[in-house]
Image: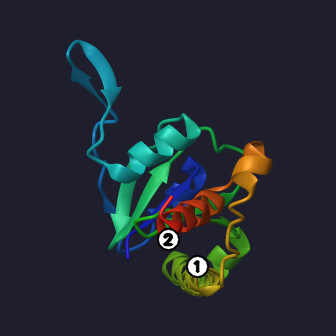
Amino acid sequence: MLINIVTNLKIVQQIKFSKYFQVNLGFVSTIDKGGRRIYNESDNFSNYYNSTYRTTIYAQGNIGNIRFYVDHYITSEDYLVIYYGDTFEEFIVNFDFIQLNKKGIDSYLGSIIKEIDEEYEELKNTKKLKELEVKPKGDSSKISQTPGQVTWDDIKVYMEKKRTSGN
């Protein structure tokens, strides 16, 4: 599972002490296309982050399938914003320098990732349960009585009734 972590420069400097950290400066954030500078779409996550928060992040490196980015607008807050998987589920974790000093960077990051992994599985199971819940059927009479409050389910029921009655 691909994990993207965005944080400030101070925390990334601590993460770089990991013996597994590899410098990888990623893709160029903008490219020239037809005389205009546009955002590079080669890095899906960076492109997603830019379009969501309207700011540019800078790749710093990775540890296995965990990629680290710096957002220079995150300055005074000491937290990691972790984007999990292809859907970029967002988790925010306060970075604890005391735990970092006690455990070391590799062990501390491992405990954070394990915690996020468990939260993600719980979130996934909750979403599956919500999908399995019976959704209320629509009300076809709303189309003629209160057209401003019609939902998609109302239209489905109306079309199904129309199809079965032959009108």
Q: Which residue is mark 2?
A: 164
Can residue 48 be spotted in the picture? yes
How many angstroms separate mark 1 from mark 2 (CA)?
Answer: 49 Å
- Residue at 43% x, 72% y: name it: 18
- Residue at 62% x, 38% y: name it: 73
Q: Position of residue 68 (x, y in %)?
A: 44, 58
| Mark 2 residue element | helix
- Residue at 53% x, 75% y: name it: 105
Q: Which residue is mark 1?
A: 116
| Mark 1 residue element | helix
Q: Position of residue 102 (x, y in %)?
A: 66, 82
Can residue 77 be spotted in the picture? no
Residue type pointed to by label 1? Ile
Furthest residue in direction right, as rendered = 146
- Coloration of the structure image: rainbow
Furthest residue in direction left, as rendered = 34
Residue type pointed to by label 2? Thr
- The vertical placement of 39 against 144, above or below, is above
